[in-house]
Image: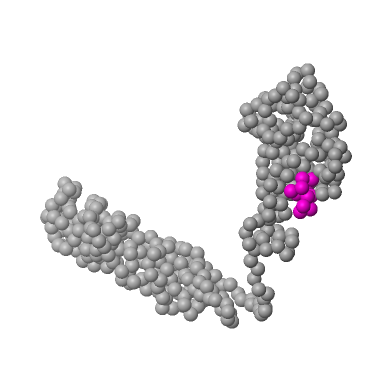
């Protein structure tokens, strides 16, 4: 494996091959093509790319302490520069001669000799490590070639693209090897990730979706692979809950009295597969399903007030400062007054909305993060009966 001079050594090797085997020996140059007066064969390295097939190889020499080398593919553009319109035919012949040499000598190894002078074609930087360079034509579309020449800002010339592989650069990183394994043990354990099929209040509210519940309600979850010594239920960012009843296909838990209102994601978490030591029990989490927690209205103060008054509602769970909280008197929506800290007693000023409130009794609902408190219903008439506040 060569040092960081390996890329330069590969370019030098290609130039040496062209200068030694072309008939007659041409003028050569390397670098970005530029306009000039002298006719010459130019070799331009336009892209360096890591060889994906060798990215994770081990170091070729097991005795070395270094990590695997950086393996590179070098992309070259071969062209003839500096020709006048009268020399165009000879330039095409010169390009063909250069392409023939790269075709006939597709592999440059440490043994390939120079015929015009002494030595070998492969640069000493690469020859010391026994590197073999493989030269392959890399057909580019006219569009790709045009993009390259446009970036170079010089007049387009007929060109041929080649890829040279593989050039390896020795890593400076020290390789670490673990000690031999003394005790080999294989454990096969089932992976039973819980899966939630549906969630419902027990029993569901009449006329409402099954996945709607209030604080203090019992919620049933059905699915697979729930049974575990530490099965628990998570509701959004709230603390995990321990279910009261757990089977492999169902569980039941009680929504805590302070459950935050709104739409939350419910999932089931359980221990991973059981196994003998040293297998650790990881946590397995199910898919998430929606559960809407309704705000629960505990009391209304005062029960009667003028259209310019202030109404205070007491909720089962506090609402946070950033929660979207509003009061609905009949069909009039009134936002809550700002509160700096969580509170279970938000207040609502009716004054701004007094013109829309005629004297009379109004059904009261509170909306928190899109979830509305329930109204009571007369079982005989199916009419809403409360809670009610009187506006005088």
Report the number of numbered marks. 0
Coordinates of residue 193 in the picture (x, y in percent): 54, 70
Does the magenta segment cover residue 126? yes
Q: Outermost residue toward the bottom? A: 276
Residue 148 is covered by the magenta coloring = no
The single residue placed furthest to the top in the displayed view is 86
Q: Quadrant of residue 164?
A: top right
- Classify residue 37 as left or right of residue 379: right
> x and y percent of residue 77 in the render?
72, 35
Instruction: Please state which of residues 44 and 214 is positioned toward the viewer in this rendering.
Output: 44
Please name the residue shown 22% across and 55% down the image: 338
Magenta residue span:
122-133
User: Residue 86 falls in which quadrant of the image?
Assistant: top right
Q: Residue furthest front?
A: 118
The residue shown at (18%, 49%) is 353
In the image, residue 283 sits, relative to residue 292, either above or below, namely below
Q: Residue 296 appears at what percent x and percent y?
A: 28, 65
| Residue 51 place in picture, x, y as percent | 69, 50
Decide which of 346, 206 is in the foreground and name it. Answer: 346
Q: Which one is in front, 286 or 104?
A: 104
Residue 340 seen in the figure: yes
Quarter of the image for the N terminus: give it: bottom right
Which residue is most to the right? 115
Q: Is residue 146 visible?
A: no
- Left or right placement of residue 189 versus residue 263 in this view: right
The quadrant the C terminus occupies is: bottom left
Residue at point 30% right, 56% down?
A: 322
Q: Answer with left or right where residue 240 lies relative to residue 7.
A: left
Q: Quadrant of residue 199?
A: bottom left
Work out whether 362 lies above or below 232: above
Q: Tell me what residue is drawn at x 57 percent, y 77 percent.
A: 279
**In the image, is 31 to the left or to the right of 323?**
right
């Amino acid at each position: 494996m060569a040092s960081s001079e390996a890329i330069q050594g590969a370019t030098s090797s290609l130039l040496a091959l062209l200068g030694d085997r072309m008939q007659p020996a041409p003028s050569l140059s390397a670098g970005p093509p530029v306009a000039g007066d002298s006719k010459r064969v130019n070799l331009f390295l336009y892209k360096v790319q890591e060889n994906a097939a060798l990215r994770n190889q081990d170091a070729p020499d097991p005795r070395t302490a270094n990590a695997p080398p950086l393996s590179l593919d070098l992309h070259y553009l071969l062209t003839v520069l500096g020709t006048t319109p009268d020399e165009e035919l000879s330039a095409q012949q010169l390009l063909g001669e250069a392409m023939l040499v790269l075709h006939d000598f597709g592999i440059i190894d440490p043994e390939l000799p120079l015929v015009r002078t002494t030595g070998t074609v492969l640069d000493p930087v690469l020859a010391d490590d026994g590197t073999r360079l493989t030269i392959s034509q890399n057909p580019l579309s006219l569009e790709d070639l045009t993009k390259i020449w446009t970036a170079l800002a010089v007049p387009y010339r007929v060109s041929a693209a080649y890829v040279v592989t593989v050039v390896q650069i020795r890593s400076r990183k020290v390789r670490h090897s673990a000690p031999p394994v003394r005790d080999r043990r294989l454990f096969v354990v089932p992976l039973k990730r819980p899966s939630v099929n549906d969630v419902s209040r027990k029993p569901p509210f009449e006329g409402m979706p099954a996945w709607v519940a209030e604080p203090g309600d019992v919620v049933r979850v059905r699915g697979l692979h729930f049974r575990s010594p530490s099965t628990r239920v998570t509701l959004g960012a709230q603390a995990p809950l321990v279910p009261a009843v757990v089977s492999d296909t169902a569980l039941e838990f009680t929504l805590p009295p302070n459950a935050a209102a709104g739409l939350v994601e419910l999932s089931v978490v359980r221990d991973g597969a059981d196994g003998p030591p040293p297998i650790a029990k990881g946590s397995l989490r199910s898919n998430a399903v929606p559960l809407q927690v309704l705000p629960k209205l505990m009391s209304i103060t005062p029960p009667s007030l003028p259209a310019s008054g202030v109404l205070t509602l007491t909720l089962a769970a506090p609402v946070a400062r950033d929660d979207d909280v509003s009061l609905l008197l009949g069909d009039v929506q009134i936002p809550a007054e700002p509160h700096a800290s969580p509170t279970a007693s938000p207040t609502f000023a009716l004054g701004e909305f007094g013109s829309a409130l005629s004297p009379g009794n109004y059904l009261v609902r509170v909306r928190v993060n899109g979830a509305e408190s329930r109204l009571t219903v007369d079982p005989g008439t199916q009419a809403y009966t409360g809670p009610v506040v009187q506006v005088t």
